[in-house]
Amino acid sequence: MEIRRVQDRTGSWGSGTRRKVSRKKDDEPTAQLAPGAVILRPADAVLLQRLAGNGATTARLAGGGTSVQRLDIYGRAATQASALSPETVQAFARLIEAGDQAGALRVVVEAMTSRGQLDPLILRTSGEGDLWQIRDVEGFRAAASFRSRFADPDNAGRKLPNPRFTISSTGLKPEHLDELYESILHEYRHVEQQAERVNSTEQQAETFGYGADPDEFDAYLSEVELSYRRGHMQTAALQAGVHWEFLSEANQAPFKSRWTAAQKKIQRVLGKPVSEIVATPKAESYRRQLREMERQAREAYERANGGH
């Protein structure tokens, strides 16, 4: 089976996780609407932004002639409470204590699916291998890979990305539950991206290395937007800030409004701007890592093309 793409999370310089969390009903519009604007439910506004992306949203507005006022989804401080319900937290810990890692993971996945954070319609698979796989791997909580795309059995004109999730057995511990949850959501964002890509006729731009990949910036930016813990916000802000530096101007363009709003959230939650966060030794270490990955990617590309 062909592995189309692998996204993983290394833990050498930071927490090594990728995190997201759903928005609650207390998201409220805080700005005056422009004349003729349409008010979206907060949950719909978040989904429109996350799933469609800035580029698609811009095209939608240009074609429809009606403006959509952005809702302020960044107004609340991050908290230390788990994003999952107490019942899910307790069930997860109980199953881990009983040695049932598969059951514990299933509890988390079912909770996230019931909350609408995982869509089973794009998580269908074809061929060998379970969707959720637990293996003894180090360095990340979760990783997503993709096998050969296949036709949606309910819609012959649509393709499905055929994902597989690998969950680190070492991360299946009660004290790592929130990191696991956030990692799954980050990897699921890549499934959403791939679902859009396999059904698109647009040519994908060539990028070299992990740092210059707009999909990764999109996933990190989503983490900042949906972060609920200060420690995670610090990590997500650092990663998003450094990746922004690596993007080409063309790849930065679709994200500018989202990145501007996300920086306001970072300032509000952490009390310091992104410029201060990316001027730290950890950020420079991450830059060096990304530069090395870019160098290796370019060399591999040149070898594959006869040195050109």
Image (tube, rainbow, N blue to C red):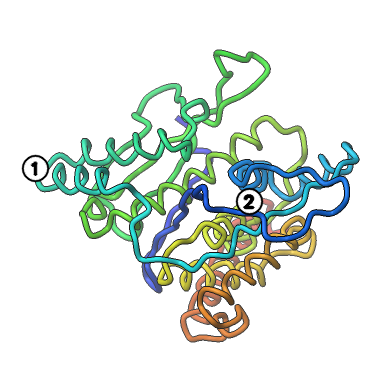
Residue furthest left in the image: 98
**Residue 109 sits in quarter:** top left
Query: Can you give x and y, in whole percent of width and height, for residue 307 in the image?
Result: 68, 59
Q: Are dots 2 and 1 in contact, CB under 8 Å?
A: no
In the rendering, which numbered label is found on residue 304? 2
Q: Residues within 10 Å of mark 2 (few under 14, many from 20)?
A: few
Identity of the residue drawn at 52% across and 58% down: 223
Horizontal relation, residue 230 to residue 302: left or right: left
Q: Amino acid at mark 2?
A: Ala
Question: In the depicted view, which residue is nearer to us: 264 or 1?
Answer: 264
Identity of the residue drawn at 31% across and 41% down: 108
Q: Amino acid at mark 1?
A: Ala
Q: Is residue 92 something that shows in the picture?
A: yes
SS at mark 2 in the image = helix
In the rendering, which numbered label is found on residue 208? none
Position of the N terminus, as image quadrant, is top left
Measure the alpha-carbon separation of dots 2 and 1.
Answer: 50 Å
Q: Is residue 91 above or below residue 12?
A: above
Question: In the depicted view, which residue is nearer to us: 303 or 301?
Answer: 301
Query: Can you give x and y, in whole percent of width and height, for residue 148 in the image?
Result: 52, 28
- If you read the primary sequence from the N terminus, does the residue marked by circle 2 or circle 1 appear first? 1
Identity of the residue drawn at 76% across and 41% down: 203
SS at mark 1 in the image = loop
In the rendering, which numbered label is found on residue 98? 1
Question: In the depicted view, which residue is nearer to us: 231 or 300?
Answer: 231
Query: Can you give x and y, in whole percent of width and height, for residue 242 in the image?
Result: 59, 72
* Mark whose residue sits in front, 2 or 1: 1
**Residue 228 sits in quarter:** bottom left
Identity of the residue drawn at 9% across and 42% down: 98
Horizontal relation, residue 225 to residue 7: left or right: right
Looking at the image, how many numbered discs can be counted on the residues? 2
